[in-house]
């Protein structure tokens, strides 16, 4: 069985959906961050798959950019995690609702 | 000498300043332990015993070493006044004064009021308004200063003896000198306003001297009473002065009277009112009904003061003023009628009160009021000369009587009650003799001073004719004649009770009785002598005998358009009138003699028992004081005050209270507006918005995951819509 573009897209879709679900339903801040990483990697996979299919390197370049930015995002996210834990002694994001109207 | 008449009042003023300053500076410091007087409120008779003894209550005392100085300055200044007064009179000459000569010395322009254009157009009115400080010596003021200075001098001398032991000696002489100054200013003034200055001055001195023993409540009260009652009169007087100024544009006697005499018809309509106002002033000063109440109380002052101020000089100021303004009064027949009726009524009224008084000085006080009534009666019927004649003779014999009573009081160490006297005739002979002479003079015994002046008045009243009421002249004459009889009666009652019969006081008092020192008896002798001869300046019937009438004739300016009617009675009528008045006096004398000297008061006691109501009314002075107390003090002052308070509380206070209520209401409305409308708008807007946005508020959960879910759902919907409806 040849692996076609559609297979990549399905995997990418599943990864993105799992990541999105994790972001929306998980209460642990760390898990939410990890789910965000998952979603970005799904995007990367999508970009590379289309780059390969269209023989255009722009997609791959973009995915390298995304990985770079994801590193920065992870750093900031972990810093926020530590800061949040110091303030609240918990990582439950339902507790961090100071901005509620 | 005649240019120096301004010095006559000035000498006593200097004496006042010296005496007053020496007294103030040289007085002993007050004795602290005696400053508060626990017995200040004593009845008159008892406290008068203190006189002659050291006044422990005095706040300051005349230092003994200054007593001689006070005597010298006090008496000497008045002596200089006497010299200058007589000098000025003889310098002008009696005959020239009688011919109408007058001497006016203007010291300076006192009140310049500037030029009045509108008034200047009216003929007879002065264009320039001013008041000068000017003195005027004419026949009337000459007569006045002659007896004022001379009687005043005698009483000053008398005071040396009478007040000798008094610790307020310096104060006494300072007041007495100030009185002489004021009286002489009053008499010599050349215009109404300067006269008013003297008028107020004598009122002040009268107050000071009545309340001389100011630590005794009755004396201080009497002084206050005199001052207040006089103030009522002074108010009338100053209204009269305003009237004169409004009518004539000047206050100078000469100008006012010549203008009125030259052109009577221009002023007649207003003169009745002006004259009545002036007469109110005269009533106050000369103690005429209904303002007579202060004079009997004024006897709280030292006896020489009663003699000088409340008998001989000051109280005659009213008569003098009316005589001075005779031109105005003659133009106002209605005012003359009032003057005559008030004078006649006062004469009779106070003579009856005098019948039942038991205080020696009170009897003399009511006698004075009565005699002043006589003088006003004379003025009221147009006999101004007779009035002034009686003023003069009365000054002599009444001063003699008062000083004599002072001598009696002195002899009895302060006793003033007639019921505790008697039998003094052999113990104090000089006093007795002079007192008897003066009594005969006041009673109108033939050929003594009072006979001539009283007869002149009675004749004038008999001949008088009032166009308004033809019967009035004879009625007044009958009243005056009856008063003459009463006068003789109460005066001889006084003599009987004082000098005749047995002594009714205590044994100690009897042992102490002594004749007064020579400083007191010599003035008595001189005054008694004058009481004998004083009347010979006005002998009626005999040609050229009425010297005082000729002397004073210049003051009676002839009025234009009115013929001078010298209604001289027939000689026979005049003789008959004399006989009747002498008969009336003799009747009074005989009744008094038999009832009091012989039967020792049994008949009067029976009369008093028979008509107790009338007796009580007379003895209590017809309850005039009580009436005033009820009407003015209780009624007007207290009840009126209460009524005014009520009015204030009920009506006047409505204004501030109402304003407060309105303000309170307005501010309540404003506050409610603020609270409910303004705040309501603001809060209402906020509340509305708050309620309105309650729904949207829910969206802001503060949970990022919710936002992300919504975002995701939104994105999904958008993409789905794109895919489906492409």
Image (cartoon, rainbow, N blue to C red):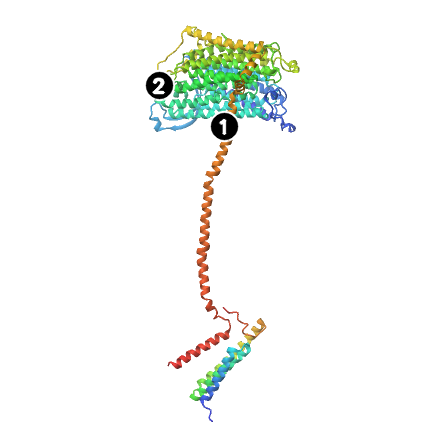
Residue B204 visible from this viewpoint: no
Residue B19 falls left or right of residue B545: right
Q: Is residue B351 above or below residue B715?
A: above
Q: Are marks 2 and 1 on the same chain?
A: yes
Residue B548 quadrant: top left
Report the residue marked by disc 2. Answer: B262
Q: Is residue B248 above or below residue B87?
A: below
Secondary element type, mark 1: helix
Q: Position of residue B30 (x, y in %)?
A: 63, 27
The foreground one among B313 and B409 is B409
Q: Is residue B141 above or below residue B651?
A: above
Q: Which is more N-terminal, label 1 or label 2? A: 2
Report the residue marked by disc 1. Answer: B632
Dot 2, crowdedness within 10 Å: few (<14), some or many (≥20)?
some
Q: Position of residue B196 (x, y in %)?
A: 46, 24
Q: Position of residue B301 (x, y in %)?
A: 56, 21
Q: Position of residue B55 (x, y in %)?
A: 62, 23
- Position of the C terminus of chain B, as image quadrant, is bottom left
Secondary element type, mark 2: helix
The foreground one among B405 and B631 is B631
Residue A66 visible from this viewpoint: yes
Q: Residue at x 45, y 43 (%)?
A: B658
Extreme residue toward the bottom, this view = A1
Q: Chain of mark 2?
A: B
Dot 1, crowdedness within 10 Å: few (<14), some or many (≥20)?
some
């Amino acid at each position: 069985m040849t692996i076609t573009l559609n297979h990549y897209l399905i995997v990418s879709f599943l990864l993105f959906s799992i990541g999105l679900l994790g972001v929306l339903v998980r209460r642990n801040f760390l898990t939410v961050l990890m789910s965000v990483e998952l979603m970005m990697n799904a995007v990367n996979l999508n970009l590379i798959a289309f780059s390969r299919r269209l023989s255009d390197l722009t997609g791959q370049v973009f995915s390298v950019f995304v990985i770079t930015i994801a590193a920065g995002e992870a750093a900031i996210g972990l810093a926020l995690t530590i800061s949040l834990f110091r303030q609240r002694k918990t990582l439950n994001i339902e507790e961090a609702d100071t901005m509620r109207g | 000498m005649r240019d120096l008449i301004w010095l006559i009042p000035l000498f006593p003023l200097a004496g006042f300043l010296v005496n007053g300053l020496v007294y103030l500076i040289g007085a002993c410091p007050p004795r602290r332990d005696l400053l508060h007087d626990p017995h200040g409120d004593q009845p008159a008779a008892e406290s008068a015993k203190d006189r002659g003894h050291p006044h422990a209550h005095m706040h300051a005392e005349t230092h003994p070493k200054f007593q001689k100085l006070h005597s010298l300055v006090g008496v000497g200044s008045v002596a200089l006044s006497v010299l200058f007064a007589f000098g000025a009179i003889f310098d002008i000459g009696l005959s020239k004064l009688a011919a109408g000569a007058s001497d006016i010395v203007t010291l300076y322009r006192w009140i310049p009021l500037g030029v009045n254009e509108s008034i200047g157009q009216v003929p007879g009115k002065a264009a320039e308004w001013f008041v000068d400080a000017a003195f005027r010596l004419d026949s009337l003021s000459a007569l006045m200063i002659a007896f004022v200075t001379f009687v005043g001098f005698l009483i000053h001398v008398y005071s040396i003896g009478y007040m000798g032991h008094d610790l307020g000696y310096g104060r006494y002489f300072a007041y007495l000198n100030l009185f002489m100054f004021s009286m002489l200013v009053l008499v010599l003034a050349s215009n109404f306003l300067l006269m008013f200055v003297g008028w107020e001055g004598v009122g002040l001195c009268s107050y000071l001297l009545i309340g001389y023993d100011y630590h005794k409540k009755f004396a201080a009260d009497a002084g206050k009473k005199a001052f207040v009652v006089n103030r009522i009169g002074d108010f009338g007087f100053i209204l009269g002065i305003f009237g004169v100024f409004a009518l004539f544009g000047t206050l100078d006697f000469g100008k006012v009277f010549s203008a009125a005499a030259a052109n009577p018809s221009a002023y007649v309509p207003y003169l009745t009112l002006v004259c009545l106002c002036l007469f109110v002033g005269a009533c106050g000063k000369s103690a005429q009904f209904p303002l007579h109440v202060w004079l009997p109380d004024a006897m709280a002052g030292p006896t020489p003061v009663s003699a000088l101020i409340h008998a001989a000089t000051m109280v005659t100021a009213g008569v003098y003023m009316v005589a001075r303004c005779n031109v105005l009064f003659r133009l106002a027949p209605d005012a003359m009628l009032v003057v005559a009726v008030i004078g006649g009524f006062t004469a009779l009224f106070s003579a009856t009160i005098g019948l039942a008084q038991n205080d020696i000085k009170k009897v003399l006080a009511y006698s004075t009021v009565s005699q002043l009534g006589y003088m006003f009666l004379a003025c009221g019927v147009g006999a101004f000369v007779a009035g002034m004649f009686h003023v003069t003779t009365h000054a002599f014999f009444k001063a003699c009587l008062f000083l004599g009573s002072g001598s009696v009081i002195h002899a009895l160490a302060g006793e003033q009650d007639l019921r505790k006297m008697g039998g003094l005739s052999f113990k104090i002979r000089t006093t007795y003799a002079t007192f008897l002479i003066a009594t005969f003079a006041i009673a109108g015994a033939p050929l003594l001073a009072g006979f001539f002046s009283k007869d002149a008045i009675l004749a004038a009243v008999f001949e008088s004719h009032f166009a308004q009421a033809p019967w009035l002249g004879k009625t007044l004459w009958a009243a005056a004649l009856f008063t003459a009889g009463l006068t003789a009666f109460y005066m001889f009652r006084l003599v009987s009770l004082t000098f005749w019969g047995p002594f009714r006081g205590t044994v100690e008092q009897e042992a102490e009785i002594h004749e007064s020192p020579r400083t007191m008896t010599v003035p008595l002798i001189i005054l008694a002598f004058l009481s004998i001869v004083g009347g010979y300046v006005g002998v009626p019937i005999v040609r050229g005998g009425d010297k005082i009438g000729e002397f004073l004739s210049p003051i009676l300016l002839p009025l234009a358009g009115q013929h001078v009617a010298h209604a001289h009675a027939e000689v026979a009528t005049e003789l008959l009138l004399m006989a009747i008045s002498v008969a009336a006096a003799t009747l009074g004398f005989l009744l008094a003699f038999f009832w009091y000297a012989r039967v020792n008061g049994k008949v009067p006691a029976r009369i008093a028992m028979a008509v107790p109501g009338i007796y009580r009314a007379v003895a209590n002075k017809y309850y005039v004081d009580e009436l005033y107390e009820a009407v003015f003090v209780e009624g007007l002052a207290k009840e009126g005050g209460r009524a005014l308070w009520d009015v204030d509380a009920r009506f006047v206070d409505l204004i501030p209270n109402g304003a407060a209520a309105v303000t309170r209401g307005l501010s309540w409305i404003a506050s409610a507006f603020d609270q409910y409308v303004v705040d309501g708008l603001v809060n209402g807007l906020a509340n509305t918005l708050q309620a309105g946005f309650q729904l949207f508020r829910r969206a802001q959960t503060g949970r990022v995951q919710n936002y992300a879910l919504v975002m995701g759902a939104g994105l999904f919907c958008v993409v789905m819509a794109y895919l489906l409806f492409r």
